[in-house]
Image (cartoon, rainbow, N blue to C red):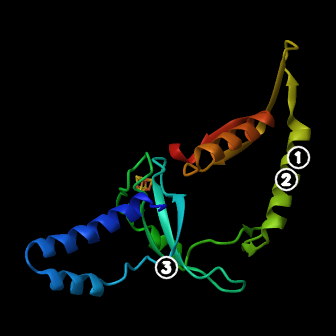
Amino acid sequence: MDLSRRGFIKLTGATLATSSLGALGFGSCGEAVAENVRPFKLTHAKETRNTCTYCSVACGILIYTLGDGAKNARSDIIHIEGDPDHPVNRGTLCPKGSALLDIVHAPTRLQVPKYRKPGGTEFEEVSWDWALDRIARLMKDDRDKNFIAKNAEGTTVNRWISTGMLAASASSTETSYLTWKVARSFGMLVFDNQARV
Ligand code: SF4
């Protein structure tokens, strides 16, 4: 039987409760309890591992979603808790992390990129494709204009210091590695992480 750590704890807990009642002479009572145990509320939820978005500790979280994944069906996140198998937090979350469900459902949460034209006063919604193309265009133009291949002594330095990047602290190790490689491969020196904010 393929049994996860979480499933093992649930199974042994239920078995222990039933057998303890039996040992105390409440045999039929134990069966009745077992039959009437309320189904675990997350039984039918989809479990997704992720990282807390709030700070550089980067605690592991489990996100539970209801929805069958059918086309046009909207899934809903119903519960978030600490990941007991994550080496950073071992299932614990601080008060901010414990309130992650609120940030997910907050009506003020920004979910689309917004753009304010030069000289404009209002932000307007734009598509991700448009935003990424725009960022790539501006980066390319600036790099072409300001890239420093050699310093005053003629030594190769390959620096690009007129544009910087601020990365997210809640990235996985793999994402952080790739982000670092991309920034450095551009020659970008101005690179920092939200963990220091
Ligand atoms: S749960 Fe708390 S300590 Fe952990 S990453 Fe989130 S904000 Fe930081």
Label 1, on which residue?
A: 140
Query: Secondary structure under badge 1?
Result: helix
Looking at the image, is 196 positioned above or below residue 40? above
Residue 44: numbered disc: 3
| Three-letter code for the amino acid on which mark 1 is drawn | Lys
Looking at the image, is 28 positioned above or below residue 20? below
**Residue at x 75%, y 75% (from the top left corner):** 124
What crowding class fits label 1: few (fewer than 14 Cα within 10 Å), some (14-19), or many (20 or more)?
few
Contact between marks 1 and 2 (CB within 8 A): the answer is yes
State which quadrant residue 160 falls in: top right
Label 2, on which residue?
A: 136
**Residue at x 85%, y 59% (from the top left corner):** 134
Q: Nearer the viewer, residue 100 or 35?
A: 35
Q: CA distance from mark 3 to mark 1?
A: 47 Å
Q: Is residue 25 left or right of residue 92?
A: left
Query: Secondary structure under badge 3?
Result: loop
Q: Residue furthest top?
A: 153
